[in-house]
Image (spheres, rainbow, N blue to C red):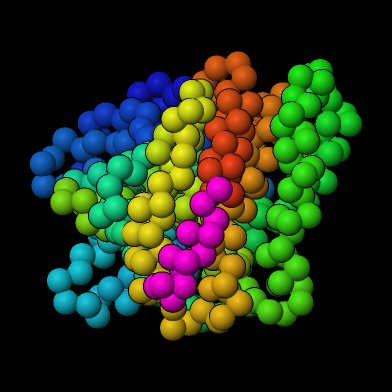
């Protein structure tokens, strides 16, 4: 991350048509991809803002991405305006346009910046510790999917091609192992075997899609728990991080949430004995999600929700370990070996799910 100083940040903010007077800006949140700043205004009665530099190495078509976000947020906002008591400025992201009326500002160095209203009085959790919170997460992502089911117009742009395409991810892993640019492949024989042992099984969702048994829907694709904000009473407030909203299978949203909402430890926990899937959190999340989606999903989709829970520690663990072998070029890391540590924690989580898979399926059947 290039660290901008306050003068730079103030100057970038000046490109945007926001209300209030810039007071200060500072790094914010724990995302792995974009550079996020909170911008505070001097006035007590004006909004604060989120300023983000969108990672254009990851998102190669930022204009297409922002077009998606404008379509998605306008559609949800319209729906909210019809709901009594809803507050769209807090319950859906609000894009602040530039003075020229664009959804992003491109600076002289080629960086892309955008601004949102800062959703005030929010709570954001990297780890879920109660079934109540897990239920709120499931309910919010279930509702999100339901609200976008009737988005009019052309399909959304693919902001990262092959994002959850497991065959492509597996091929990329094997190719990276072969290249082995920083000599790390020989240090991870157990992880390589772990991946190869499960590779075929993990292609299940792609095959169902190819066989026409499950439809493509509009999915969020990055449903980790800190991408839903809760309010001060820990009730669901707003789904954020809309960069990867694009066509996908429902399993992608359910799976990535299960990966983060049911883990008893951090995504990158070094002490693997702490990493387990908590079946009570699984049940609470599944109940919340299915309440909003059970009427629209088909039988085959629901039959494979529990499997989606296993797919995501696998696919994200695979991406972490691929990035480790590649020399840490994609995810922000905080120390040497961080991506390997993350991958190991994800694979441990998958093992915990493998042991509890029968119960996971029974729970989905109970709430379907
Ligand atoms: P990344 O893709 O890097 O994860 P996010 O868009 O998720 O970026 O933003 C990073 C963090 O910033 C979020 O986890 C959240 O804590 C905070 N955040 C993002 N947008 C808002 C917003 N509009 N209001 C309040 N907090 C936000
Ligand atoms: C990234 O952007 P963030 O931090 O919410 C990643 C997700 C991974 C996640 C792992 C665009 O999410 O796919 O699941 O890290 N986002 C992108 O924590 O690659
Ligand atoms: Mg995020």
Q: Residue at x 79, y 42 (%)?
A: 196
Residue 123 pos. (x, y %): 25, 44
Residue 199 pos. (x, y %): 76, 49
Read off the magenta span. Answer: 355-368
Magenta segment: does it hold 49?
no
Residue 297 shows in this picture: yes
Please give left or right for residue 162 compared with residue 243 in the image.
right
Residue 323 pos. (x, y %): 69, 32
Q: Residue at x 21, y 38 (%)?
A: 41
Depicted 180 relative to depicted 22: above or below: above
Residue 59 pos. (x, y %): 62, 47
Question: Between 187 and 100, which is closer to the camera in this rendering?
Answer: 187
Q: Residue at x 34, y 44 (%)?
A: 128
All told, the count of numbered labels is 0
Asked where in the image residue 27 lies, by quadrant, the reply is top left
Q: Residue at x 82, y 21 (%)?
A: 186
Quarter that holds the C terminus: bottom left
């Amino acid at each position: 991350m290039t660290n901008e100083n306050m003068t730079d940040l103030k100057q970038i903010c000046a490109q945007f048509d926001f209300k209030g007077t810039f007071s200060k800006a500072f790094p914010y949140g724990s995302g792995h991809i974009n550079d996020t700043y909170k911008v505070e205004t001097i006035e007590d009665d004006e909004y604060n803002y989120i300023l983000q530099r969108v990672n254009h190495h990851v998102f190669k078509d930022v204009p297409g991405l922002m077009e998606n976000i404008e379509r998605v947020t306008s559609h949800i906002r319209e729906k909210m305006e019809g709901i009594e008591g809803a507050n769209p400025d807090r319950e859906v992201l609000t894009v602040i346009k530039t003075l020229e009326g664009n959804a992003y500002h491109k600076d002289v160095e080629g960086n892309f910046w955008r601004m949102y209203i800062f959703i005030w009085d929010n709570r954001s959790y990297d780890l879920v510790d109660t079934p109540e919170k897990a239920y709120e997460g499931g309910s919010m992502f279930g509702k999100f999917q339901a609200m976008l089911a009737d988005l009019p117009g052309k399909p959304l742009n693919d902001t990262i091609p092959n994002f959850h395409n497991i065959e492509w991810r597996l091929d990329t892993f094997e190719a990276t192992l072969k290249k082995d640019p920083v000599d790390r492949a020989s240090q991870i024989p157990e992880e390589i075997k772990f991946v190869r042992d499960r590779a075929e099984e993990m292609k299940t969702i792609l095959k169902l899609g190819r066989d026409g048994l499950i439809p493509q829907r509009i999915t969020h694709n990055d449903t980790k728990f800190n991408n839903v904000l809760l309010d001060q009473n820990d009730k669901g407030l707003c789904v954020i991080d809309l960069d990867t909203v694009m066509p996908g299978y429902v399993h992608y949203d359910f799976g990535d949430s299960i990966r983060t909402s049911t883990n008893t430890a951090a995504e990158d926990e070094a002490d693997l004995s702490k990493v387990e899937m908590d079946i009570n959190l699984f049940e609470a999340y599944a109940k919340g999600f299915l309440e909003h989606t059970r009427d629209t999903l088909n039988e085959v989709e629901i039959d494979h929700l529990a499997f989606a829970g296993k797919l995501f520690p696998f696919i994200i663990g695979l991406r972490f370990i691929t990035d480790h072998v590649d020399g840490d070029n994609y995810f922000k890391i905080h120390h040497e070996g961080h991506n390997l540590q993350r991958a190991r924690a994800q694979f441990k989580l998958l093992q915990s799910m493998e042991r509890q898979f029968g119960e996971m399926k029974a729970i989905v059947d109970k709430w379907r």
